[in-house]
Image (spheres, rainbow, N blue to C red):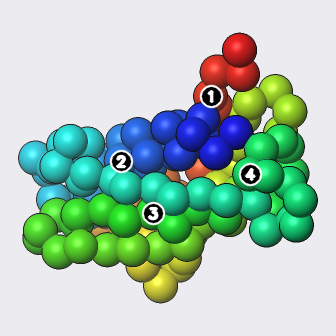
Amino acid sequence: TRPRVEGSIGPVFANLYVQQQALLGHPGLTPTAVATKPTCHRTTPGSHDKGAGSDWICQVGWTDGTGKHQNGKFELQVRSNGCYQAGGPTKIVGPLMIQTSTDKQVINPVFEFDGCFDTT
C-alpha cells in the first residue's frame, strides 16, 4: 500500500544518501537531517495505490548537505514479497559511478537501490 511504500523509501533513501555524502567527503550528515518526505502512487488506473507492479512513482523531497531542498522522482518496481527496486534521477542523485574524496571510483549508493517493507 501507499503508506508502506512511503514509510520504507524515505528512511532507506536517507540512509543511503548519508552514505553517498560521506563517500564524497561530506561526513557528519545524518538521516534525520536529510528529512525525506516521499509521496508515492501507482500510475495504473484503478490500482488504488496498492499492490505489486513496476508502475510505482515516488516523489521524494530531502535536504542536502548544504541545507538546500532537493526533489526527485524515483521509479519503483514493487514485488509481492514487499521488496522493491528504486531508481532515481541521475541529474540530482548522480551517475552510477562516483569518485570518492580519496579518488576511488565506486558505485553510487543512491543511483539505484533496493528496500523492503513489512507486508503483514
Q: Amino acid at mark 2?
A: Ala
Instruction: Estimate the x, y position of residue 94 in percent, counting from the top left.
Output: 45, 75
Q: Can you identify the residue that label 3 sits on?
A: 60
Q: Nearer the observer, disc 4 or disc 3?
A: 4
Q: 92 or 68, which is in the foreground?
A: 68
Which kind of residue does numbered mark 1 sit on? Phe
Q: Which quarter of the rendered picture does the C terminus lie within?
A: top right
> Mark 1 sits on what residue?
117
Which secondary structure, mark 2?
A: helix
Labels 2, 3: front one? 3
Q: CA distance from mark 2 to mark 3?
A: 10 Å
- Residue 51 placement, left or right of 26: right
Q: Mark 2 near mark 1, Cβ–Cβ under 8 Å?
A: no
Q: Are marks 1 and 3 in contact (CB under 8 Å)?
A: no
Residue in the picture at 47% in, 73% down: 72
Foreground disc of the pair 2, 1: 1
Q: Residue visible at 55% across and 72% down?
A: 73
Q: Amino acid at mark 4?
A: Asp
Q: Which residue is mark 2?
A: 14
Q: Earlier in the sequence, mark 1 or mark 4?
A: 4
* Residue 22 in the image: above or below residue 4: below
**Which badge, 2 or 1, is on the more N-terminal residue?**
2
